[in-house]
Image (cartoon, rainbow, N blue to C red):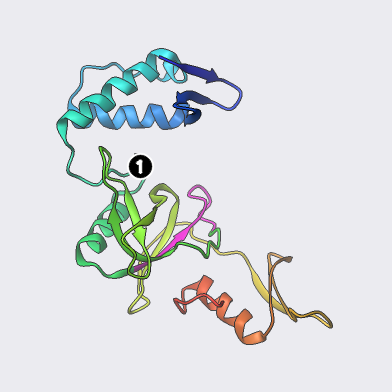
Amino acid sequence: MDVVINNDQELFVVSAGGGYSTLGFEYVFKQLKQLVVRLNLTIQIREDEKGTIGQYADFQKAVTEAGKANLKETWFNLDTPIAVRRLLETYRKNGKLIRIFYGDVTTGEDWLEENDVVGKVDRSSGTFKIPILLQGGESWGVSILDNSIVKLMDVEDRRILWKHSKYQSPQIDILAKRCGANKYVVNLDGGPHASFSSYAKAAQWVAFMAGECMEAPR
């Protein structure tokens, strides 16, 4: 097994062909916990073995068994709330557009992510069918960070489907500049974040971040 342990960054560094891939200690630990329960494996999982070659070997065994089992369900992160899982599955099946707000799940603070947050829910192929987001009729999509979601909205009716109990958004202000092509600056919590050529575009960006409109300014 060609694996190097990087204790400083808490990563398993795995040789992969001509390069390397990495897996975090915490990721391996939580994935292993899910697999043991889902597949009813007789593998002992210990917190004090996190980051060891032994636990990584157990993880690889569990992944092999998962491949044999041909898992059918969508594979969510262990920390993703049940309510979020159910909503993502509902929208995957009904094909409706959803708006995702990512953020800090400890504080509930919105990261104000504007890319890859509106689309249709689908899932990947492979052993672990993780949730993905499809945009604009594309047949491929980006992974949904399901364990970092702080709010979900229905795109069609702007209805809030779910919100983190501590959900909060930074203070947003639009300020006019005296010179320059981009005459309007959007401040977050008092600091500059983005600039726009017109007040309308700045206002649209703010509305998009708040979920009041579903199209970001271009």
Which residue reaches farthest right? 178
Residue at the disc numbered 1: 77
Taking the magenta stretch, the answer to whether it contains residue 41 is: no
Side (left or right) of 177 relative to 209? right
Image height of 72 relative to 133, above or below: above
Please tell me which residue is depicted at 50% across the width and 63% down the height of the picture.
115
Count neighbours of disc 1 (C-alpha within 10 A) and say few if under 14, some if 14 to 19, many if 20 or more. some
Q: Quadrant of residue 16?
A: top left
Please tell me which residue lies in front, 209 or 63.
63
Image height of 166 relative to 124, above or below: below
Side (left or right) of 122 relative to 49? left
Which residue reaches farthest front? 18
Q: How many marks?
A: 1
Amino acid residing under circle 1:
Asn
Please tell me which residue is depicted at 42% across the width and 32% down the height of the picture.
27
Please tell me which residue lies in front, 7 or 107.
7
Q: Position of residue 43 (x, y in %)?
A: 26, 17
- Where does the magenta region start and end? 98-109
Please tell me which residue is depicted at 63% across the width and 79% down the height of the picture.
202
Please tell me which residue lies in front, 62 or 158.
62
Side (left or right) of 143 relative to 195? left
Identify the element where label 1 is drawn.
loop
Q: Position of residue 131 (x, y in %)?
A: 32, 51
Q: Quadrant of the N terminus?
A: top left
Taking the magenta stretch, the answer to whether it contains residue 108 is: yes
Q: Position of residue 54 (x, y in %)?
A: 39, 13
Image height of 209 relative to 57, above or below: below
Please tell me which residue is depicted at 50% across the width and 47% down the height of the picture.
106
Q: Quadrant of residue 90?
A: bottom left
Q: Position of residue 102 (x, y in %)?
A: 48, 57
Q: Quadrant of the C terminus?
A: bottom right
